[in-house]
Every structure is written in structure tokens, then in C-alpha cells.
Image: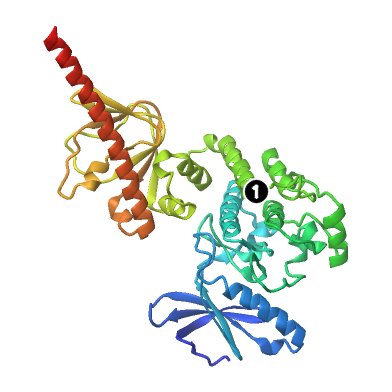
């Protein structure tokens, strides 16, 4: 195997890592020239026929998700080949490392980063749940980190998939991260992933597992019977809000645990609204939640909103700042995330725009060189979402379509308002002439 330079149509570049049953390689798709990660399964290690059967089933489960889960925070499965001795899966290549190294006492991430990572996991797993998929093996080793807070969840091999005819494999998952119902081998819902993500949060905050057990039996006893100390017991600067979130995610009784991913992510957003005002940075959690609430983006899917987040710049603008000037050129357009702006022509106030409104888009929509036709001035402190059309051009078709649709809705609204104004003016004029 060491001398291998090709698997199927993929050219092997180098080995990325190796596990008990598989080796992962960095490879190039010779057709698309795209870098991919290939997980090559070595069934020879599994002499035991029963075990080989279990692993083959895990493999088929993950392979069956190829193309099904398309989300910016889930590792995409591009292809899978099950062919006697050669069994491999092709995934998008994610440069970065897993969260394992950041779950150690001497290498912990900042608290706000942990909250933001958890929020993105909530959103990704909520998306998976809508696709009928429960992960069942959420742990730091299955979450990849790129840059500061960008994550991708991987290894859906243990996933439970609704409407699948096969019986589930029991005993998958990592004991330390298993929910009480998983330990008891009861039927599982998405709440098992909520529990496991709570344990991940605990480990990222403290570098410790909530249950300090010397073996699996002792671990299972703790999971079923013992309430762990709050994260702040080990990391005193942990805010009480996060202690509460972790405790609720890890409730043994599913009736007391978060029922939905939305409840879990809402509490994280609330945490940020308490913490964030003190900081100048706008966290992705806050940005995503803001976009979700703006009328301009009401028809965008979650996946399209993450894309908007990626292609936009967010700026805090103090009161009275002139944002656009009459006569200047520029094609950037803006959406108000917070605050109010005044639209002014030669000193006369034409209109006020509020959060969710868009301005500057005429320059983007017109073909020729466009000069701004009004001044736009911040009436109070505002937060602007700034979008450069040159970046938007490179967005996915779905995302661009949603912008076109939003512009259309907005222009129709403005036209009808202008028509109403004109008809009022004409009515006034007729009245005056009659008198």
C-alpha cells in the first residue's frame, strides 16, 4: 500500500492520518483538479467476520450521505466506492486540525470562540436533523477547525438515518460523549447529539471530561447517575450563562434537556448579546442571527445565509457619519443591520431607512457607470452589511438568485409607495384647481 500513487481517478499526494481501520490521504481529482481527502478502509485488519460486517455497515451509512448533506459546516462526502478489496470514501479536503488539541487544559480556546463554535455546530446539526440524520458520535475529534472559528463536522459513519431499512448498529459512539439514552441503547433522537455537544462544550471550556472515570463501566455509571460540577468549577472565568447552557444541554432527562437545536442556539445568541456589547467585534453568531431576522433575507435558506456572511463586510458607523455622497461613484450596496439612516438631496430629507432596508443597490443594478444621486447619513449609530458586487458575482447561483428576488420585492415596494405619493399629490392638485 505504501507505494500507491492512485486510487481510482484520484492521484495520491500524501498521507494525512491513519486509524485502526482506515488511512486518510490527500489526493487530487484528476478531472476537476480539486484537492480531496480519501479515506481508504482496510478490511484486512478486521479478521473477525462480525466486526467486518459492522464496519462495512458504518461505511455504507456514511457513503449513503454522499451529496445529501450540503452545508458549510459539514464535511461534504463527494463519492464512495465499495468494491470487494478496495473500499474508499472521497470527502472535501479541510485544511486545519480537529478540536481534540484544543480540549487539553494547557491549550484551551477563548470562551467566546467556544460559544461561537458551539453555535455553528448547533446550526449544522439542526440542518442534518432536517435531512433526517442524527450524527450519534459528536466529539472533538469529529469537529474540524479552520481559521479562528470556522468548523466542519465530519465522520457521519455512526449516523442514524431516518427511513433506512437496515437495523442500527449498537455500541457506536465514544463512551465519554454518549448520552444516557445511548448508553442504555434506547431509541435515539436528535437530543442525543444535543447532549454530546454539551459534553464537547464542557471539554473545550475546561480541558476535562465531566465524568472522571477510570474505565467504561465506571463512566457509564457516572453518565446515568452523577451530576458533574459546572465548567466554572475548573475555569472560574466561565460566565454563569455558559454554565447554565452546558447543564441544560447535558440534562440526563430528555424532558429537561434542550428539546430543539433552536432553543440551544437561541441561548447562545442571548449569551453573545450580553457579552458582545463590551467588544467591538461582531461575532458570527450575532451576524447570522441578525441576518435571519431581517426582512431582506426572509427567503434565504440557512446555507445561503452562511454564504452571505462569508461575502459581506460588517461595519459599525457612528452617528452623523456620511456613508454615501451625491455624485460619487462606487457599486457597493448596503443593508442596514441596525440603526437608521437619512437619505438627503441638496440638504432636503427625502426619506429615512431603517434596519432591514437596503441602499446603494441602484449602482449595482444599473449596467453603466453609475453616480450616487443622494447623500446617505447615519441618523444614529448604525451597523452596515456591505456587499461588493464583484464578490457577489462569485457566489452560488442560489445565493445570487435570492439577492435578485429581494431587490425585486424591494423595488416593487418602493414603486407602490411612489405611486401612492403621486396619486396624493394629484388629488391635492385637483382639489386646489376646483377651489
The coloring applied to the image is: rainbow
Q: Nearer the viewer, residue 96 or 84?
A: 84
Q: Residue at x 13, y 10 (%)?
A: 434
Q: Nearer the viewer, residue 110 or 301?
A: 301
Residue 28 horizontal side relative to residue 18, left or right = left
User: What percent of the width, then of the height, locates residue 77?
Assistant: 52, 71
Q: Residue at x 61, y 39 (%)?
A: 271
Q: Residue furthest front?
A: 434
User: What percent of the width, then of the height, locates residue 44?
Assistant: 68, 90
- Position of residue 242 relative to residue 139, above or below, is above
Q: How many marks?
A: 1
- Position of residue 418 relative to residue 367, above or below, is above
SS class of the residue under badge 1?
Answer: loop
Q: Residue at x 65, y 57 (%)?
A: 107
Answer yes or no: is residue 20 visible.
no
Residue assigned mark 1: 260
Q: Nearer the viewer, residue 396 or 278?
A: 396
- Position of residue 424 relative to residue 262, above or below, is above
Figure quadrant of the C terminus: top left
Residue 67 horizontal side relative to residue 192, left or right = left
Answer yes or no: is residue 427 visible.
yes
User: What percent of the width, then of the height, locates residue 312?
Assistant: 38, 49
Q: Residue at x 76, y 70 (%)?
A: 170
Residue 382 horizontal side relative to residue 408, left or right = right
Amino acid at each position: 500500500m505504501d507505494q500507491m500513487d492512485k486510487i481510482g481517478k484520484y492521484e495520491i499526494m500524501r498521507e494525512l492520518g491513519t486509524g485502526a481501520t482506515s488511512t486518510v490521504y490527500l489526493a487530487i481529482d484528476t478531472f476537476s483538479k480539486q484537492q480531496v481527502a480519501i479515506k481508504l478502509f482496510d478490511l484486512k485488519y478486521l479478521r473477525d467476520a462480525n466486526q467486518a460486517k459492522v464496519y462495512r455497515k458504518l461505511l455504507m451509512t456514511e457513503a449513503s450521505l454522499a451529496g445529501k448533506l450540503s452545508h458549510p459546516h459539514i464535511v461534504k462526502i463527494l463519492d464512495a466506492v465499495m468494491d470487494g478489496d478496495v473500499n474508499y470514501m472521497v470527502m472535501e479536503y479541510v485544511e486545519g486540525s480537529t478540536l481534540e488539541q484544543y480540549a487539553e487544559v494547557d491549550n484551551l480556546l477563548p470562551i467566546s470562540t467556544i460559544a461561537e463554535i458551539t453555535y455553528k455546530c448547533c446550526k449544522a446539526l439542526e440542518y442534518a436533523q432536517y435531512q433526517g440524520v442524527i450524527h450519534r458520535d459528536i466529539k472533538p475529534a469529529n469537529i474540524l477547525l479552520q481559521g479562528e472559528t470556522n468548523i466542519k463536522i465530519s465522520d457521519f459513519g455512526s449516523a442514524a438515518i431516518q427511513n433506512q431499512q437496515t437495523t442500527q448498529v449498537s455500541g457506536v459512539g465514544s463512551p465519554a460523549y454518549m448520552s444516557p439514552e445511548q448508553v442504555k441503547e434506547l431509541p435515539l433522537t436528535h437530543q442525543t447529539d444535543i447532549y454530546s455537544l454539551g459534553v464537547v462544550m464542557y471539554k473545550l471550556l475546561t480541558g476535562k471530561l465531566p465524568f472522571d472515570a477510570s474505565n467504561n463501566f465506571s463512566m457509564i455509571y457516572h453518565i446515568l447517575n452523577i451530576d458533574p460540577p459546572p465548567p466554572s468549577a475548573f475555569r472560574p472565568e466561565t460566565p454563569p450563562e455558559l454554565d447554565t447552557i452546558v447543564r441544560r444541554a447535558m440534562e440526563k432527562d430528555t424532558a429537561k434537556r434542550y428539546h430543539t437545536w433552536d432553543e440551544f442556539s437561541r441561548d447562545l445568541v442571548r449569551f453573545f448579546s450580553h457579552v458582545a456589547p463590551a467588544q467591538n467585534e461582531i461575532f458570527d453568531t450575532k451576524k447570522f442571527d441578525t441576518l435571519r431576522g431581517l426582512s431582506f433575507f426572509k427567503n434565504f435558506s440557512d446555507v445561503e445565509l452562511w454564504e452571505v456572511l462569508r461575502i459581506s463586510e460588517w461595519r459599525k458607523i457612528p452617528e452623523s457619519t456620511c456613508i454615501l455622497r451625491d455624485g460619487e461613484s462606487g457599486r457597493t450596496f448596503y443593508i442596514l443591520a441596525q440603526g437608521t439612516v437619512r437619505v438627503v438631496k441638496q440638504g432636503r430629507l427625502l426619506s429615512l431607512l431603517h434596519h432591514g432596508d437596503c441602499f446603494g443597490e441602484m449602482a449595482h443594478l444599473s449596467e453603466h457607470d453609475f453616480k450616487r444621486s443622494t447623500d446617505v447619513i447615519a441618523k444614529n449609530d448604525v451597523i452596515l452589511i456591505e456587499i461588493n458586487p464583484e464578490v457577489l458575482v462569485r457566489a452560488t447561483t442560489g445565493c445570487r438568485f435570492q439577492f435578485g428576488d429581494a431587490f425585486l420585492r424591494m423595488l416593487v415596494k418602493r414603486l407602490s409607495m411612489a405611486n401612492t405619493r403621486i396619486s396624493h399629490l394629484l388629488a391635492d392638485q385637483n382639489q386646489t384647481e376646483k377651489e
